[in-house]
Amino acid sequence: MKKSIITLLAFCGLLGASSCDKNNNLLLFGIEQDKQLGQQVSNEINNDPSYNILSESQNREAYAYLEGMRDEILNSGAVEYKDDFAWELKIIDDQNVLNAFATPGGYIYVYTGLIKYLEDPDDLAGVMGHEIAHADLRHTSRNLQNNYGIQILLSIISGQADSELSQIALGLATNGALMQFSQKFEKESDLKSVEYLAGTKYRCDGAATFFQKLEEENPANEDIFSQINAFFSTHPQPADRADYIPEEAEKVGCSTKPSGESSQQAYDLFKSNLGLLL
Ligand SMILES: [Zn+2]
């Protein structure tokens, strides 16, 4: 075990910084390739009408609100690839889906079903922090490299593997089996979201509130419950996360106070603009 770690460290050193992350985990994909692949995947999603992307020109205020939330997280000082990745946001109009996802290179997608479900801006900021972390920690690239192999990913980038590209887009959007993150990656993103949010106006344990809310959901609410079951089947141990996220917040010493009345009003207006307030 020790020997293989030493070999890998040496290998990472030889390959140069772009091939390995801060923890010296080997990733053959470079930052440029993350960006190129992310752009291909996002083009695929954005140009396919079946994904129902909400038009930015017709929903300017809603996008401006979400971009403001994103920018606050990006400016927290904790996002490693803040100036490298695209950090482009899209809202997918499907009120039956409680999900958000990120491609490599920072293209973030949020479903209206998730926005409708989350009552507080801090909860949404928590989920957004979590998704930004998946891209920033390059989890999606690692998963894709493991599942598809570097050659197929390079073919996708050069436009020579269209069926794999649409497979990847669909897998990301529907939380398909090949796109599911390991428990380790989920925990890393959860903890990173605390670090990001510590530098914002939002409560830094917002990601935990989402999991608590899912946990406490009434099974009699069948519509929501079937979505939650689908969510839980692809996300590990929500109860644990509702515990370790606040623990991390305590360790970091960041604020767990809600972001306040004016923040709540802005969030309610955002939901109302999207027609999501009950
Ligand atoms: Zn995740």
Image (tube, rainbow, N blue to C red):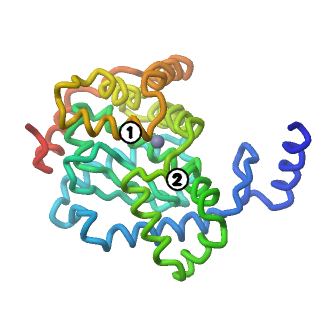
Q: Is residue 42 above or below residue 22?
A: below
The residue tagged 1 is 127
**SS of the residue at dot 2?**
loop
Residue 212 position within the rendered picture, expressed as x and y whole percent measured from the top left: 35, 23
Q: Is residue 131 above or below residue 235?
A: below
Query: What crowding class fits label 2: few (fewer than 14 Cα within 10 Å), some (14-19), or many (20 or more)?
Result: some
Residue at x 30%, y 25% (from the top left corner): 213
Foreground pick, 179 / 8: 179
Residue 263 position within the rendered picture, expressed as x and y whole percent measured from the top left: 24, 34
Quadrant of res 229: top left
Residue 146 position within the rendered picture, expressed as x and y whole percent measured from the top left: 64, 56
Residue at x 52%, y 53% (from the top left corner): 82
What's under tag 2, amino acid-wise? Lys
Query: What crowding class fits label 1: few (fewer than 14 Cα within 10 Å), some (14-19), or many (20 or more)?
Result: many
Residue at x 76%, y 47% (from the top left corner): 24
**Quadrant the N terminus occupies:** top right
The residue tagged 2 is 82
**SS of the residue at dot 1?**
helix
**Which comes before the other along the chain, label 1 or label 2?**
2
Which residue appears farthest toward the right when viewing the image? 3
What's under tag 1, amino acid-wise? Val
